[in-house]
Image (spheres, rainbow, N blue to C red):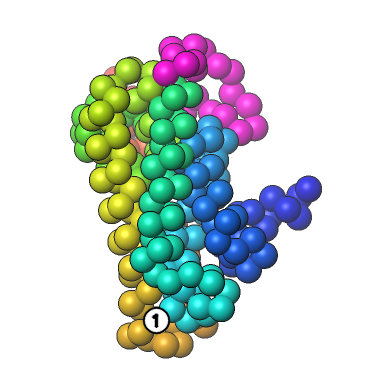
Amino acid sequence: MWEFLKQLTDPNSIIEYGGLWLLLFVIFAETGLLVGFFLPGDNLILLAGILCKAKPELMKVDFFPMVSLMVSAAVVGNLAGFWFGKVVGTRLYKRKDSLLFKQRHLELTKQYYDKFGGNLTLVLARFLPVVRTFAPVIAGVIKVDFFRFMLMNVVGAVAWILSLSGIGYFLVQWFPGITDYMGYIFIFLIILTALPILRIVFSRKKKASEL
């Protein structure tokens, strides 16, 4: 079981052993299941773009059909999160912390709603680990208008999937040996996507210390 979880959090293993269908499930799970926040969505999408060009025999699909499928998985995932939040409602804020659920994740996401509003948060959240898992859930809890939610859902999914997979796809053309440096790229991407979250966390701690 532990070995399976390790593979599920490793982008290379996901695509190597599970192929396109496991890739789509992980994208769906990270945005549609409350426990999916730990999955490597950004790295996986970037890697999918790289392998689509560098190892087409592994992906077994062309770039644009792959992007369309990934966007669909992301849209359906957000829709599942929205539905869950709408059904559970404010009871979610009373749920106790567990191994795969932390109230601080909800609080962090709510700060983005307070700062940027619902529309922008639903788009920006796609690029932020943890926040992208809880953003559609909170949208359901606060009962965001469904059609407005779906518009931002699609816009965010297209921007997220197309930008990261596109970067990976074209990087291979410009730097054919890039597959030898995937570890460094993943570390850089993790740091880059974590910076906005760290900024809000430290800002919150600073305000708390000033009170």
Secondary structure found at label 1: helix
Extent of the magenta region: 86-106
Q: Main secondary structure of the magenta part?
A: helix
Mark 1 Cα within 10 Å, few/some/many (few <14, many 20+)?
some
Mark yes or no: residue 93 visible.
no
Image quadrant where residue 12 sits: bottom right
Q: Position of residue 43 (x, y in %)?
A: 47, 61
Taking the magenta stretch, the answer to whether it contains residue 98 is yes
Q: Is residue 2 above or below residue 32?
A: below
Mark yes or no: residue 177 visible.
yes
Q: Position of residue 190 (x, y in %)?
A: 44, 57
Image quadrant where residue 65 sits: bottom left
Depth check: give the residue in front, 132 or 54: 54
Q: Is residue 147 above or below residue 90?
A: below
Q: Position of residue 130 (x, y in %)?
A: 45, 40
Residue, x 23% and y 30% (percent of image)? 148
Q: Is residue 60 above or below residue 119?
A: below
The residue tagged 1 is: 172
Residue, x 29% and y 25% (percent of image)? 146
| Side of 13 where 210 appears, left or right | left
Image quadrant where residue 101 sits: top right
Residue, x 26% and y 22% (percent of image)? 145
Q: Number of labelled discs?
A: 1
Residue, x 41% and y 37% (percent of image)? 78
Outermost residue on the bottom side: it is 176
Q: What kind of residue is marked 1? A: Val
Quarter of the rendering occupied by the C terminus = top left
Taking the magenta stretch, the answer to whether it contains residue 181 is no
| Side of 37 where 189 appears, left or right | left
